[in-house]
Amino acid sequence: MMLAPGATPTNKDFVENKDKPNISFVVKNSRIRLLGNGKDIGGEQILGQKLNEMLQQVKQSQAGHSVTTMKDFGAGGAVFKRHGIKSTFPQFFRDAGFKTKKEFVKAMKRKTGPAFKRIVSQAISDLQNGSETNFGNEPPNKDFLVKTKQLFDNRNIIFRTIDGKVVPIRTNMPHQIEDKVPF
C-alpha cells in the first residue's frame, strides 16, 4: 500500500498540510465564521462546542480561598494553621484577563467586543495546539485540524500512481478494520 505524500509509517492517517491556511474569524450577527486565508473553511460547529465547553468550565469553577484548621491540641491550647485552597478557574480565564464569572458569561452571551474575540482566539488556539486543563493535557482536535485544512485525513483513501502522478482514491471501507475473525 502506498502512503500519502508526506506520510510516515507511524502516522499514515493524518498528514500535515504544508500550505495550510492561516485561520482567522469574523463575527456577524452573533455568528462566528472561520476563514482560512480570507475564505470560508468550516469548523464552526467544533468551535461552538469548544466555546460551550469553556463556558461550562468557568460556570463550574470556584475562586480560591483560605481555610483555618486545627493543627494540634495540647496543654497550651489549640494551635491553628491557615492554608489556601487553589482556584479551579481554568488558565484561559486568567490569560484572557477576566476577573469574575459574571464578566466572562456576559462576554459569551453578547458575542461581540474584544473580550469575546480573546475567548474565540483562545478556543481556536486550543483546538489547533491542544491545551492544559485542570485535569491534564488535552491534545489538538484532529477533526478541527482536518476541517480547517491544517491536516489531511487519509483514512479511507488509497494512493495509486497513475500516469506518473500520485492520485488519491476514496474508498468506502470503515476507519477501523478488525484484525480478528469474529467467530
Image: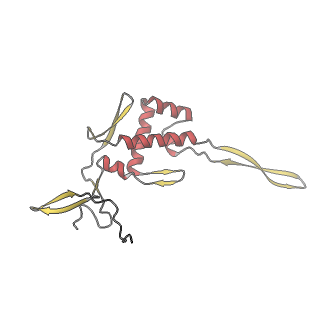
Residue at image point 40% right, 52% down: 140
Residue at image point 45% right, 33% down: 115
In the rendered image of this protein, does residue 140 appear above or below residue 121? Answer: below
The image quadrant that residue 175 belongs to is: bottom left
> In screen coordinates, is 139 left or right of 136?
left
Foreground residue among 163 and 80: 163
For the N terminus, the image quarter is bottom left
Residue farthest along the right direction in this orientation: 75
Residue farthest along the front direction in this orientation: 183
The image quadrant that residue 24 belongs to is: top left
Residue farthest along the left direction in this orientation: 163
For the C terminus, the image quarter is bottom left
Q: Indicate how the structure is coloured in the image.
A: secondary structure
In the rendered image of this protein, does residue 24 appear above or below residue 79? Answer: above
Q: Position of residue 54 (x, y in %)?
A: 48, 42
> In screen coordinates, is 24 left or right of 94?
left
Q: Position of residue 167 (x, y in %)?
A: 16, 58
Does residue 80 appear in this view? yes
Foreground residue among 21 and 95: 21
Q: How many marks?
A: 0
Q: Position of residue 117 (x, y in %)?
A: 41, 35
Does residue 122 appear in this view? no
Q: Position of residue 174 (x, y in %)?
A: 31, 59
Residue at image point 55% right, 32% down: 102
